[in-house]
Image (cartoon, grey):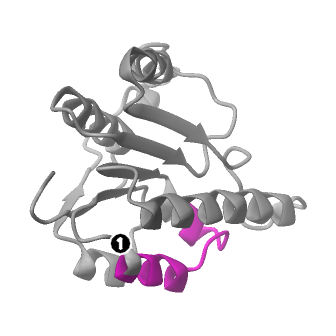
Amino acid sequence: MAARGLIIVHTGNGKGKTTAALGLAVRAWGDGLRVLILQFIKGSWKYGELETLRILGEMNGRMEVRRGGRGFSQRDTEDKAEHRKAAQEAWREALEEITASRWDLIVLDEINYAVKFGLVEIEQVMELLDKKPSELHLVLTGRDARPELIERADLVTEMRLIKHPYQEGIKAQKGIEF
């Protein structure tokens, strides 16, 4: 276990925030760490990484992915209350797991979107950082990370969009974008 767990933020408008966090999770698993990935927005989306992570978890029980949320949400949709309820359930689970000291690395995937859309309050996130065990590594992903989170983090990476195939009319492709 690390002498000091880091707070890591992957943000920005470019592709790769979740992918980078999952790559870090695989590295940690390979080095013997216990890894939990909690997804706040993606809901029932199916994508290739989940199968890999499921297999790794079945190998020795040190990798787990839990999917919360109801998919991507717009701020003014009629079902915002349902999205908020799902995000708050995921939040309670995150709080329990972070304070339980069962994991070495926890990824809060798309938590920054949950904050942006008002599904989770930034004050909740900041209070959670105060409760994080000192040895736990915590990764927070999603666009538009709040300035106070960026200030508090030990490592912040901004993915910047330069060019994307979608701009040329190329649809998302299995194995690349999902």
Left or right: 33 as drawn, with respect to 177 = left
Tell me residue 34's x, y (percent): 32, 40
Question: Which residue is disc 1 drawn over?
Answer: 132
* Residue at image location 55% in from the left, 70% down from the top: 115
Q: Is residue 105 above or below residue 57?
A: below
* Residue at image location 51% in from the left, 80% down from the top: 122
Q: Is residue 175 above or below residue 133?
A: above
* Residue at image location 40% in from the left, 51% down from the top: 102
Specify the farthest residue to the left.
Answer: 3
Instruction: Name the kind of residue labelled 1 in the image.
Output: Lys
Tell me residue 36's x, y (percent): 43, 43
Tell me residue 128's x, y (percent): 45, 76
Number of marks in picture: 1
Tell me residue 50's x, y (percent): 49, 23
Per the picture, the main secondary structure of the magenta-coloured stretch is helix
Where is residue 177, by image quadrant?
top left
Specify the farthest residue to the right.
Answer: 78
Secondary structure of residue under mark 1: loop
- Span shown in magenta: 114-130
Between residue 163 and residue 54, name the one nearer to us. 54
From where the camera sits, is residue 74 visible?
Answer: no
Where is residue 149, by image quadrant?
bottom left
From where the camera sits, is residue 45 visible?
Answer: yes
